[in-house]
């Protein structure tokens, strides 16, 4: 071994900078990080991980297990899910996020009990049986703040529906080959808006025109399209996007309020109108800095020859 020599601060800094590699994106930084379970880089699969199904091979080898930025190999995270005593996140002890469970099951189908406990995560199903061709119900939600009359809420829902359908048809490459041009696969989107008070119970009553609305969405999709939709969301989240940024891009509305690990899209077999959990509570300071919702104009897009109008 080479002898240890005392180095000055400048010499230590020069040696450090000589070996420094700048990684611009979160995805690059995650890939260069070692999984804390197997201690291997997450840019490649775990050494003992089997080959993944064809449909999952274009997805990352890693997953944000709890929604708090704690990434592990999907194969390593699968071992956590298989043992009820180790299901919680090793770093923060939080329960695994639903999108993580879905992503793991799509890459490595779970034996037997693939569905998460309804006691922990609500009416979410992760059954990925290849013989199941029944339509799947996908559900998600978020909150908006601002004054709105009844006719304005109807206009808001119509715009959201039209923007979402346009985004799914043209802006999500994962649907190529699954959703033919002009398909009505997304036309059945159901939207329910309900006034909800999100301030603490002891807070002074706000003016009736400054309200908050819970926006619930339910969409029945063919199995392949539903899985592709959830995978598209999970891939974007794993790359550093947030559910708020996806809502802004697909629905053209902002800003929203949402709760990580609960309000993102998921497979749901329950009643979609009723909330899955109590709405979040905001302090007066949090409520005051939350801006009124606004519509973002979609950039113009030229239709292809023979393409139907949206």
Image (tube, rainbow, N blue to C red):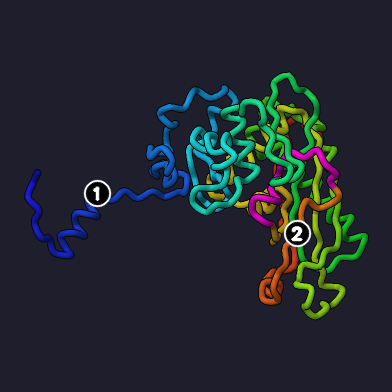
Residue 55 rendering spot, x and y as whole percentages: 60, 25
Front residue of 85 and 99: 85
- Image point 74% across, 30% down: which residue? 305
Asked if the stretch drawn in magenta spans residue 137, the answer is: no
Q: Can residue 131 be seen in this view?
A: yes
Residue lying farthest to the bottom in this orientation:
204
Q: Please tell me whether the stretch drawn in magenta is mainly helix, strand or loop.
A: loop
Name the residue beneath numbered marker 2.
Answer: 143
Residue lying farthest to the right in this orientation:
151
- Image point 68% across, 27% down: which residue? 128
Residue 14 rendering spot, x and y as whole percentages: 19, 57
Identify the disc placed on residue 157: none
Asked if the stretch drawn in magenta spans residue 265, the answer is: yes
Considering the numbered disc 1 on the image, is that residue within a helix, a strand or a loop?
loop
> What's the magenta region?
259-272
Residue 37 rendering spot, x and y as whole percentages: 43, 40
Name the residue beneath numbered marker 1.
Answer: 19
- Give the crowd class for mark 1: few <14, some 14-19, many >=20 residues within 10 Å: few
């Amino acid at each position: 071994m080479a002898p240890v020599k005392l180095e000055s601060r400048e010499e230590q800094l020069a040696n450090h900078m000589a070996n420094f590699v700048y990684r611009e994106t979160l995805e690059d930084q995650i890939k260069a990080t070692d999984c804390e379970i197997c201690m291997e880089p997450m840019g490649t699969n775990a050494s003992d991980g089997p080959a993944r199904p064809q449909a999952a091979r274009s997805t990352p080898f890693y997953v944000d297990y709890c929604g708090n930025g704690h990434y592990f190999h999907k194969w390593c995270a699968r071992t956590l899910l298989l043992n009820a005593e180790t299901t919680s996140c090793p770093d923060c002890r939080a329960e695994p996020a639903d999108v993580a469970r879905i992503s793991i099951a799509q890459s490595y189908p779970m034996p037997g009990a693939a569905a998460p406990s309804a006691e922990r995560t609500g009416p979410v199903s992760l059954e990925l049986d290849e013989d199941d061709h029944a339509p799947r119900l996908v559900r998600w939600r978020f909150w908006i703040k601002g004054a709105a009359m009844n006719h304005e809420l109807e206009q808001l829902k119509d715009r959201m529906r039209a923007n979402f359908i346009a985004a799914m048809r043209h802006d999500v490459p994962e649907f190529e080959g699954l959703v033919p041009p002009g398909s009505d696969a997304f036309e059945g989107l159901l939207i329910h808006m309900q006034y909800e008070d999100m301030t603490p119970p002891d807070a002074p009553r706000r003016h009736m025109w400054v309200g908050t609305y819970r926006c619930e969405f339910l969409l029945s999709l063919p199995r392949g399209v539903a899985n592709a939709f959830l995978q598209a969301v999970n891939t974007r989240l794993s790359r550093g996007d947030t559910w708020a940024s996806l809502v802004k891009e697909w629905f053209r509305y902002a800003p929203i309020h949402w709760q990580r690990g609960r309000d993102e899209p998921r497979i749901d077999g329950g009643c979609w109108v009723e909330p899955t959990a109590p709405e979040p509570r905001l302090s007066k300071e949090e409520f005051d800095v939350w801006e009124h919702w606004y519509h973002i104009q979609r950039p113009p897009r030229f239709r292809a020859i023979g393409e139907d109008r949206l």
